[in-house]
Amino acid sequence: MSAQRPICIAGAGSVGCFVGGMLAADGRNVSLLARPRVVDGIAQNGLQLSSFEGGQWRLRAGQVAPSQDPAIMKDANMIVVAVKSGDTAAMAELIARHSAEDAVIISLQNGVGNVATLKQTLPGHCVLGGMVPFNVVTRDDGSVHRGTSGALVIERDAKENGKRLAVQNLPVSLTENIIGVQWGKLLVNLSNALNALSDLPLHTQLQRRSWRLLFADQMTEGLAVLRAAGISPVATNALPHALTPHLLRLPDSLFGLILRSVMKIDANARSSMWADLQRGRPTEIDHLQGVVVQLANQYGIATPLSRRVIEVVKAAEDMKRGSPALSPQQIRGS
């Protein structure tokens, strides 16, 4: 494969723009397949990126080649899928129609079912799973901000294709167990809905024990379901998942010390689900808490809190008024 062929980010929202922007900032040939709002914004103002560490980057439209036309995938030797989970099947069909036969497909999406969906539609391609550990949001001015730390994790294949996404300020780790990593991220992502419903910055929320107790109870439900299903989640930081609910229940001062040792969080970081509610878009709740509930049904495990969170998020989606700014007690229904 020629090194001059582009990497195409298929579904360049917040995460896709950040990953593509970091690649372009390092001199890679990048194209962005995005919605009209994103394409127009980049065409007018370029792509502005920032990070909690203080880094700032501004790229010209020509450096990232934004387009609404899926035909931009035809020359790519790698296609990074970054759409919401509910859009995976539709994107797979576009890739099947427009991509080169030798293009490697990498899924950088939340949830655990996207790789199977892509493989079903793209049997002739190398399809690899991935996991994005950090938080990215698009601000009101169109700039894209990374709010937490972590390295991309990508499934290892014989050619170690995932390493091609590793550049300065965007480290990559390869794994033999992407399924375990994705389930581990799903457990962590159970907090996305809580952040969306709270209307609080993530750092502020984690400093309050009442919110951490709610998150701990969510994780406890999820861990019980995974044990019943024989699934072992893989942690991508120093905290084993089995221990995390206990740590979340610690007093604020003790938990704060632990949090600072394992993760760096921007004071204003928010979850992508919060951004979805703010913009009146459908959330990924069915691919997070919804997956836990579906698996729980198969094994007869009770998940009342997960069911309640789904109900409250869907109500907020229907209202289309942004985050409802609920308390932990309101979310619990008590």
Image (cartoon, rainbow, N blue to C red):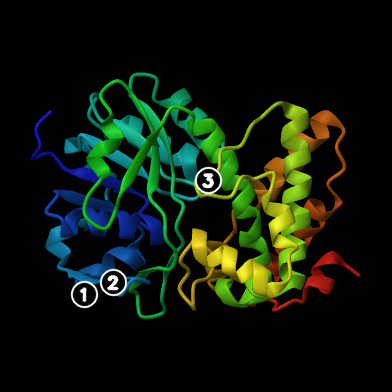
Indicate the position of residue 249 as horizontal and vertical percent values.
Answer: 75, 62
Query: Where is mark 1, residue-wise?
Result: 44
Q: Earlier in the sequence, mark 2 or mark 3?
A: 2
SS label for mark 3: helix
Q: Amino acid at mark 1?
A: Gln
- Please identify the quadrant where the C terminus is shown: bottom right
Crowd tier of the residue under label 1, counting other residues whose Cα lies within 10 Å: few below 14, some 14–19, many 20 or above:
few
Q: Is residue 125 above or below residue 192?
A: above
Dot in front, 2 or 3:
3
| Residue ID at (36%, 28%) | 156
On the question of residue 322 being in view, the answer is no
- Please identify the quadrant where the N terminus is shown: top left
Q: Which mark is residue 41?
A: 2
SS label for mark 2: helix
Q: Is residue 169 left or right of residue 229?
A: left
Crowd tier of the residue under label 3, counting other residues whose Cα lies within 10 Å: few below 14, some 14–19, many 20 or above:
many
Q: Which mark is residue 85?
A: 3
SS label for mark 1: helix
User: Closest to the observer: 174 or 237?
Assistant: 237
Crowd tier of the residue under label 2, counting other residues whose Cα lies within 10 Å: few below 14, some 14–19, many 20 or above:
some
